[in-house]
Amino acid sequence: MRMELLIDGVYQLGAGMVNSYIIDGDEGVTLVDTLVRGRDGAIAQNLKEIGRSLADVRAILLTHSHMDHTGSASAIKAASTARVYASEADTPAIQGVEKPPNPPTHWYWRPMYWPAVFFPDPPPVEVDHFVSEDAKEVLPGGLRAIDTPGHTPGHTSYILDRAGGLLLVGDAAVATKDGRVKRLAFNRSTPGIDGSLRHLAEFEFEIAAFCHSKPIRTHASGAFRKFAESLTSPTAPNPHHIAAVSERR
């Protein structure tokens, strides 16, 4: 499995189709998402390349409950001392209490929602800690949560405030080959999704990394602002809008 350095100590795993992230720090390894079920061995091999192992994983941060993000979390948690972090809203699906919701997909995509077609259901994994932007806490790996509901009820993006800022977008958006932001194919315009896109545009970050496309490596927050300005749909009020504008700019 391909591993790409984003900034010092932060690696993207995957080649654009499905990505997850390694953050290598003094207190151990933090993973953001875990790919599909059965990829723990490939993740272990990538960790070996940087002198780490699954035993070094201290935290698993999940962006949301879909199988291509939580698939190997249970196996990695069992092989390490990792604690699992996720939003409260997505936790029932992550823990197997309920079925993960399909995203707000255009009608013509619904028969072929690809994760459900091609990948096996992940084993449930216990969530040890809820994440929320309201908490304003520094999470493992130096990350902070940004609430970006829409793709799932508790979808969460994460930002790392160093090297000019690195945004781990999750499935809130994807990037085009020429470095523009666009909707994920399965995210039709809804007040929640568009509100989250506008919210992400309020932050400053040099790099944006996406779970289903290649990263934007320069002026990424500008690309988000340009896309947000193009949105004409109504948006649900985001409770963090005023705080983000006053604190991040």
Image: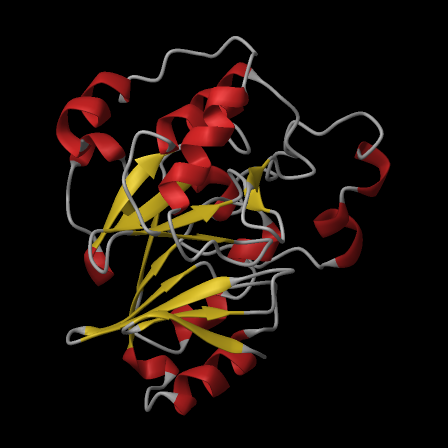
User: Residue at left 55%, top 81%?
Assistant: 42
Image side of residue 22 versus residue 83, left or right: right
Residue placed most toward the observer, 183 or 218: 218
Residue 39 lies, with reference to residue 73, above or below; the image says: below
Residue at the extreme top of the image, as rendered: 234
Residue placed most toward the observer, 76 or 221: 221
Give the image location of residue 63, x and y in percent. Answer: 43, 47
* Quarter of the picture holding the N terminus: bottom right
Give the image location of residue 95, x and y in percent. Answer: 47, 48
- Colouring scheme applied when the structure was drawn: secondary structure
Q: Is residue 6 visible?
A: yes
Give the image location of residue 94, x and y in percent. Answer: 49, 47
Residue placed most toward the observer, 109 or 247: 247
User: Residue at left 22%, top 23%?
Assistant: 245
Residue 33 lies, with reference to residue 56, above or below; the image says: above
Residue placed most toward the observer, 87 or 29: 29
* Quarter of the picture holding the C terminus: top left
- Quarter holding residue 5: bottom left
User: Residue at left 61%, top 72%?
Assistant: 38
Image side of residue 29 versus residue 221, left or right: left
Give the image location of residue 234, x and y in percent. Answer: 52, 8
What is the tally of numbered marks visible in this picture? 0
Image side of residue 161 versus residue 66, left or right: left
Residue 225 lies, with reference to residue 65, above or below; the image says: above
Q: Can residue 90 be seen in this view?
A: no
User: Residue at left 55%, top 33%?
Assistant: 151
